[in-house]
Amino acid sequence: MSLLPIRVFPDPVLTTPTTEVTEIDGALAALCDSMIETMYDAPGVGLAANQIGVGQRFFVYDAGEGPRVVINPRIVETSGEWEYDEGCLSVPGMGWPITRPGTVHLVGVDLEGRGLDVVATELEARIFLHETDHLDGHLLLDRLDEDERREALRELRGRRLRLGRRAD
């Protein structure tokens, strides 16, 4: 296992929808192990494949009960509301109170190829929504209102300029 570089905004891989995983094998399992190590090191509670530059539809997460992998996730139902201060490893050092559904029904597949059918609430639901957003090519920035987004982009451009990078 090894730590993987996490892609950060404005990397275009973050806004490109991922494709379904068609083969679950040892290489995928090893990549997931490295993603879990990277997620913990960051530190974070979830990490989508495209955040490490892989354009496939899977993510790793830990909502407090140990690391898990979800392959080809799909949200089939949501309900309620829950506001929570949400951050993102691809938009480091920033976070906002975001209202999302409080309950989520997710289906997918695990690393053994078994079907997953999970109804999650609060933090686990939030992770599912956040990571599937990534896999669909959406960032946390897309969840902000117009003024918050404008201010966030201004801050991110300023950071890039201070680091001597071109501001996009």
Image (cartoon, rainbow, N blue to C red):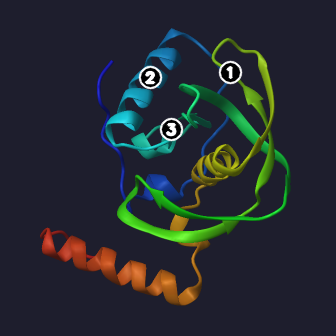
Circle 2 residue: 31
Would you say residue 112 is visible in this rendering? yes
Relative depth, front residue between 41 and 33: 41
Q: Residue furthest bottom?
A: 147
Which residue occupies 44% across, 21% down?
A: 33
Q: Looking at the picture, how far across and down is residue 61, in whole percent?
A: 55, 35
Q: Amino acid at mark 3?
A: Ala
Local SS, label 2: helix
Q: Which mark is residue 54?
A: none
Q: Amino acid at mark 1?
A: Asp
Residue 166, position as x, y percentages in the image = 21, 73
Precedes in sequence: disc 2 or disc 1: 2
Q: How far is mark 3 from mark 2, CA to CA?
A: 9 Å
Q: Position of residue 97 (x, y in %)?
A: 56, 71
Identify the residue position indicated by label 3 in the image. Answer: 49
Q: Is residue 168 visible?
A: no
Q: Are marks 3 and 1 in contact (CB under 8 Å)?
A: no
Q: How many marks?
A: 3
Secondary element under disc 1, as helix, strand or loop, is loop
Tag 3 and tag 2, C-beta contact below 8 Å: no
Which mark identifies residue 110? 1
For residue 78, which quarter of the picture?
bottom right
Q: Nearer the viewer, residue 42 or 29?
A: 42
- Mark 1 nearby-residue class (10 Å; few <14, some 14–19, many ≥20): some
Name the residue nearer the viewer: 154 or 84: 84
Query: Compared to 146, does 54 lie above or below?
Result: above
Label 2 to label 1: alpha-carbon separation: 14 Å
Label 3 sits on a secondary structure element that is: helix
Residue 96's place in the image compared with 8, above or below, is: below
User: In which quadrant of the rendered view does residue 165 lie?
Assistant: bottom left
Q: Residue at x 67, y 23 (%)?
A: 22
Q: Residue at x 61, y 69 (%)?
A: 98
